[in-house]
Image: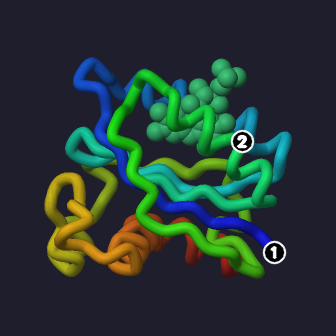
Amino acid sequence: MLKQVLYSSTANTDITMRDVLEIIRVSHNRNSKSGLTGGLLFLDGYFYQLLEGIPSDVDAAMQRIQRDWRHHDVHVRRQQRVTSPVFTDDWMALRSDAQIPTEVLQEYHYQPGMPAERYQADDLFAFLIACFENELHQQMVH
Ligand SMILES: Cc1cc2nc3c(=O)[nH]c(=O)nc-3n(C[C@H](O)[C@H](O)[C@H](O)COP(=O)(O)O)c2cc1C
């Protein structure tokens, strides 16, 4: 069984796109070594990340991620065991502001931070998946 963690966090206000690309570079490197996959959304100064893989490796990555100065208020919104990953083909996919279609934002009644009082974990999960839809679709047809 694999473990799948979905969290949201608030990016440090000093963060630039260059920092985010550096996060992805390191994540590709580290995640490929332990077979972790997932997707990271960077939207309006908030991160949303789905991380999936062997439970002990997911936990180890989450410990490093939680300590990272580039964000704070890391809030695990959902964690569960799954038989197969959503992201089969990507050590850490990235989507950020302009890449997310307005229709997706509207359909999921997007609000910055997707606060837990208003958005259930399953809704946040569905929103994240929708933001990556084209990419995930391509993975399926390969
Ligand atoms: C939003 C965010 C997402 C991250 N995602 C990952 C990830 O998927 N995998 C990973 O190994 N590190 C990820 N990191 C980076 C880790 O926090 C950490 O810097 C990196 O794993 C290197 O750790 P080390 O310096 O202890 O070797 C992420 C950091 C942030 C801020």
Query: Dot 2 corresponds to which residue?
Result: 60
Q: What residue type is labelled 2?
A: Ala
| Residue 138 position (above or below residue 68) | below
Q: What element carries label 1?
A: loop
Mark 2 closeness class: few <14, some 14–19, many ≥20 residues within 10 Å: few
Q: Which residue is at a point 44% across and 31% down the rendered structure image?
A: 20
The x and y percentages for residue 130 are: 39, 74
| Residue 12 position (above or below residue 66) | above
The x and y percentages for residue 39 are: 53, 56
Q: Nearer the viewer, residue 49 or 90?
A: 49
Per the model, the C-alpha gap separating discs 1 and 2 is: 17 Å
Mark nearer the N terminus (1 vs 2): 1
Q: Residue 25: in sight, yes or no? A: no
| Residue 75 position (above or below residue 69) | below
Q: Which residue is at a point 49% across and 27% down the rendered structure image?
A: 68
Q: Nearer the viewer, residue 111 or 133?
A: 111
The x and y percentages for residue 21 are: 49, 30
